[in-house]
């Protein structure tokens, strides 16, 4: 079989009836569907198929599952395992938007979060929105960064994703429109090889309200993907990019496996693959890794 449809549900939520429904849906529109291969019992399975384009198979299976909380990713079987991971940080590798949480230390979280939401949905220029949000933090003591970090939580599956890909020879990079104070700590905690982000400027123990230029935004994320792939001597088809906001969309669309992760509507609509119901382990299942072989558990 030259293609595979991967089905992933919250742990314990993938029934054989769902697999059969997906298999029947593919057969109904002319595909040859093989025997399902369980990657993790009652959680994830591969359904090999041939004779149908990936997007057609995914759409047919999604319709057959009729709103069940199951993530679906269809792709060619060749080259599933990626050799470069590029991941956004906020609301992707960590559960929060760290800038919004930092603003909470200044008592203006709602104001900043409203701007963040619009920027992440592509309604505002990312760089301008970042400058505006940082400007409102002028005078905030840098100790607020430590307090924000103490409350930052990793996304479920983050450690397994990076540890497993590293163990299998992939380069893993955290690329964020957020700030080095947080990306450095997240990278060290999760195990990324490197991190790329923005720098908050400070003076006399307080934020100046400015961010170092040039700002790492949408274009820079795509450029980083291309640069790291070139350094590894691989094509973009051997890369995986994951994120949730509009500033992630270019790298998601350029990567061999680009995943909109619990993403904003504009991103989910434009991405080839999306994860809406499960955690970051889904990105490993999509590459054909078996749950029993995950590292970092």
Image (cartoon, rainbow, N blue to C red):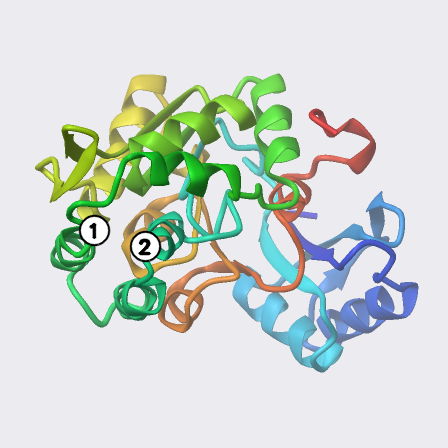
Q: Quickly name the residue at label 2.
A: 103
| Residue drawn at the location 71% of the way across and 25% of the way down | 295
Tell me which label, 1 or 2, sits earlier in the chain: 2
Q: Nearer the viewer, residue 55 or 84?
A: 84
Is 226 placed above or below 11 here?
Answer: above
Q: Is residue 27 left or right of residue 15?
A: left
Tell me the quarter of the image containing the C terminus: top right
Residue 179, percent from left and from top:
29, 37
- Residue 240 shows in the view: no
Q: Mark 2 falls on what kind of element?
A: helix
Residue 24 rendering spot, x and y as whole percentages: 81, 73
Say few, some or many: other residues with alpha carbon within 10 Å of mark 1 (under 14 / 14 to 19 / 20 or more): many
Residue at mark 1 to residue at mark 2: CA–CA distance: 7 Å
- Indicate whether 12 appears above or below 149: below
Residue under the image location 88 percent in, 54 percent down: 42
45 vs 134, nearest the viewer = 134
Mark 1 and mark 2 residues within 8 Å of each other at the beta carbon: yes
- Residue shown at 44% from the left, 39% from the top: 147
Q: Is residue 163 left or right of residue 248?
A: right
Q: Is residue 278 visible?
A: yes
The 10 Å Cα crowd at callout 2, few under 14, some 14 to 19, many 20 or more, is many
Work out which residue is located at the far left of the displayed protein and give it. 213
Q: Which mark is residue 137?
A: 1
Q: Which mark is residue 231?
A: none
Between residues 225 and 102, which one lies in front from this camera angle? 102
x, y percent for residue 204: 14, 28
């Amino acid at each position: 079989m030259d293609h595979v449809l991967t089905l992933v549900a919250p742990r314990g939520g993938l029934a054989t009836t769902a697999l059969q429904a997906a298999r029947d849906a593919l057969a109904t529109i002319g595909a040859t569907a093989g025997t399902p291969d369980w990657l993790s019992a009652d959680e994830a399975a591969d359904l090999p198929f041939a004779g149908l384009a990936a997007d057609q198979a995914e759409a047919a299976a999604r319709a057959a599952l009729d709103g069940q909380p199951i993530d679906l990713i269809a792709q060619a079987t060749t080259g599933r395992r990626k050799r470069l991971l590029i991941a956004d940080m906020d609301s992707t590798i960590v559960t929060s938007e760290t800038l919004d949480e930092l603003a909470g230390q200044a008592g203006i979280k709602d104001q900043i979060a409203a701007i963040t939401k619009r920027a992440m949905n592509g309604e505002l220029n990312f760089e301008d929105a970042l400058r505006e949000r940082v400007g409102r933090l002028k005078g905030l003591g840098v100790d607020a960064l430590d307090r924000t970090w103490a409350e930052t939580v990793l996304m479920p599956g983050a450690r397994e994703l990076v540890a497993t890909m590293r163990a299998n020879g992939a380069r893993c990079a955290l690329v964020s429109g957020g700030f080095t104070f947080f990306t450095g700590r997240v990278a060290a905690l999760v195990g990324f090889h490197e991190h790329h982000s923005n720098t908050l400027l400070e003076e006399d123990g307080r934020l100046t309200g400015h961010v170092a230029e040039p700002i790492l935004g949408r274009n820079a994320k795509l450029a980083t993907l291309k640069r790291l792939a070139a350094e590894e001597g691989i094509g973009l088809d051997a890369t995986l990019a994951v994120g949730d906001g509009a500033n992630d969309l270019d790298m998601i669309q350029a990567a061999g496996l680009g995943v909109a992760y619990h993403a904003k509507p504009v991103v989910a609509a434009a991405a080839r693959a999306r994860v809406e119901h499960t955690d970051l382990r889904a990105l490993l299942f999509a590459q054909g890794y078996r749950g029993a072989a995950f590292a970092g558990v």
